Amino acid sequence: MRLNDFKHILKKKGIDVTILLHPDINITYFTQFLPSYAMLIISQGSSELYITSLDEKPKLKEISTKLLKKGWEDKVKAKKYNKIGLNYSTITISAFNRLKKMFPGSKFVDISKDLLELRSVKTEKEIALIKKACKITDKTFELVLNNLKQGKFKTEQEISEFIENKFKDFGAELAFPSIVAMGKNAAIPHYCTGKQKLQRGFLLFDIGAKYKNYCADMSRTIFLGTISSSEKNVYNQLLETQKEAIKKAQKDMRLTDLDKLTRKSLGNYSSYFIHSLGHGVGIEIHEKPSFNEESKEKITDHQVFTIEPGIYFPGKFGLRIEDTLLFSGTLKQLTKSNKELIEIKIW
């Protein structure tokens, strides 16, 4: 993915080579290969992937693959580099010290920001894989709802296990541990799904499939039993806020500005919205672009990110509505499961 674009960055910055060491996810980004252990060396010219004999050799057009045999260090350090790029956000101190001994005359520079910014703009192939992950997520959620209506689930954990198994049936895996949160558990945004029995109240789902290394992320909140008018009002306020946020997104708009507008539209509930509006999605479930308060990032074409406002009442209940979206002139929804209030009244 975008290997030549990265080489242009190296040339512009006068970096002879970038060395990426396991478990850096950028190795998988550039190779579309998930190794058990690997090192990727990218220069302005050629690129080399070093793997162990434990993995099947991948077929790569622009990257040569070599085995990490005895004496590999001597071959690598035989080349002289003035400036070497490293991903400071992932490299360990021991690995850094090892490289400094291998290349004592080289200057090391941090290339982590460039890698993140490169990945924030998706290729058509990446978008296609994310769309597939979203489609699998939608299909699985539909099956969850059908089974809930038939009374086949008794606990949060049963639903979570069902989701993981269905993802596998569809050729995917979990992008992250599924959150299935009943009632007051849903007031904890990063709740760990447990054995809580299903009962009357809001039931929150935060789920996402990973298909061929690319992620989806979706949250839906439904109601088990008959909902009260006050509970319905909170849900509808959140739903309209999420829809408005999607409509307001424009090219070159700061993501932090979109976050601020969304909080304002929540009105009296804004103080119960305790996390950022969204995050980028790709080969990692959380990546650039960032909605962080300190970030100055702007919306641009071919970005994939979430919009996920939430309202959380500690000890009572919580709600979140989240979609994975693609910006291409406007925001296009990639997760398409129904967002209108769903009541399942067998509780």
Image (cartoon, rainbow, N blue to C red):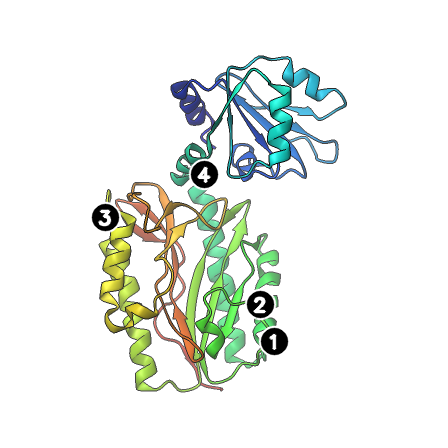
Q: CA distance from mark 2 to mark 4?
A: 29 Å
- Helix, strand or loop under label 1: loop
Whether label 4 touches label 3, CB < 8 Å: no
Provide the residue designation for mark 3: 250
Q: CA distance from mark 1 to mark 4?
A: 39 Å
* Disc number placed over residue 160 in the picture, else none: 2
Locate residue 62 relative to residue 235 in the image: left or right: right
Q: Amino acid at mark 4?
A: Lys
Q: Amino acid at mark 2?
A: Ser
Q: Nearer the viewer, mark 1 or mark 3?
A: 1
Q: CA distance from mark 1 to mark 3?
A: 42 Å
The numbered mark at residue 125 is: 4
Q: Position of residue 132 (x, y in %)?
A: 48, 50
Instruction: Count up the numbered dots.
Output: 4
Label 2: state its secondary structure: helix
Picture coordinates of residue 99, whole percent (x, y): 61, 25
Q: Secondary structure at mark 3?
A: loop
Q: Which badge, 4 or 3, is on the more N-terminal residue?
A: 4
Taking 250 as reference, is 82 above or below it?
A: above
**SS label for mark 4:** helix
Residue found 74% across the figure and 31% down from its top = 53
Alpha-carbon span between mark 3 and mark 2: 36 Å
Reading the image, the residue beneath label 1 is 195
User: Which amino acid type is shown beneath numbered disc 3?
Assistant: Gln
Q: Dot 4 surroundings within 10 Å: few (below 14), some, or many (20 or more)?
A: few
